Amino acid sequence: MKIATRGSELALWQAMHVSAALPVPSEITVVETEGDRVQDRPLAEIGGQGVFAKEIQHHVLHHQATLAVHSAKDLPSVTVSGLQIGAWLPRADPRDMLVGSTLGDLPNGARVGTSSIRRAAQLLALRPDVEIVPLRGNIRTRLEKGQRLDAIFVAAAALQRLDIWPEITEILSPELMLPQVGQGAIAIECRVDDDATLEMLASVNDSATEKAVIAERSLLRVFGTGCSLPIGGLAELSGHGLMLRAMVAAHDGTRILRGSASGDEPTQLGSALARSLVERGALALLADSDGE
């Protein structure tokens, strides 16, 4: 069984984690993606979320690999025709982390590194005095570049998986910094007609992660994209089924719409919460933000 993945340290960790979970032998095939090749432009300019997935998905669709392993946050909200997400592995910490400083210790006019429009908007809402510095690259590259800044953002799950523990960090609560849809989750894709692989993947699927991320992706689907717009979403299991939180922001953080809802059916829950945000002016907010 061939597993297609990106070649970054984190992506390889995830692919090996998937390989270890599977009940059959497998080998890993590294695929270079557009997002890996183009490091000097924002992701939104080169295609958004799909830039880390398209070439990997192409390998599976054309029978060059059996499975594709992704960070769920890199996947567009609409699944590619001919493919199916066959399993979600148990989710790691979905929250964002500030490295180099705590939020309260950021100096006035601090320079904070991130290329995430979502993170930037939420930070500016809390600290309009900071300067956002574009920052791309793998985890270790960003940490190295971050030494010349006051702080940088990373996903908590990335550092935890790679066992990297910088000296000064702060994990930000979802109330302050709502994470990207799918953050912390690993998605495994295969062909829709590969019944044997789908049956095998069902044995490693984590149903709690599946329900949560499906709700988040359903929310995102209403808006059509992810990393090119300041939208966050996080679903968690509670005593009342799923509890989904969402936010839509202006790029400069001056306006933020937040909402939450609970329910049992993930797809309906995500769509309903998104529609309620639209009714409150989310689309107009995003349109105004794009024009600024």
Image (cartoon, rainbow, N blue to C red):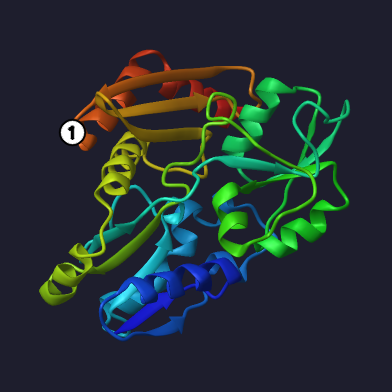
Q: Quadrant of residue 18?
A: bottom left
- Which quarter of the image is occupied by the N terminus? bottom left
Secondary structure beneath disc 1?
Answer: loop
Eyeballing the image, is 181 above or below 34?
A: above
Give the x, y percent position of residue 128: 75, 22
Residue in the picture at 40% in, 19% down: 259
The image quadrant where one finds the C terminus is top right
* Residue 272, percent from left and from top: 25, 24
For the point 52% across and 70% down, the residue is 13
Relative placement, left or right, of 15 versus 35 is left
Disc 1 residue type (three-letter): Glu
> Which of 279 and 265 lies nearest the eye of the viewer?
265
Rendered view: 232 above or below 217: above
Residue 225's place in the image compared with 56, above or below, is: above
Residue at mark 1:
265
Left or right of 126: which side holds 146? right
Which residue is at 35% across, 78% downward? 59
**Do we see residue 80 in this rendering?**
no
* Number of numbered labels in the structure image: 1
Q: Say whether residue 56 is visible.
A: yes
Q: Nearer the viewer, residue 83 or 223?
A: 83
Residue at the extreme top: 280
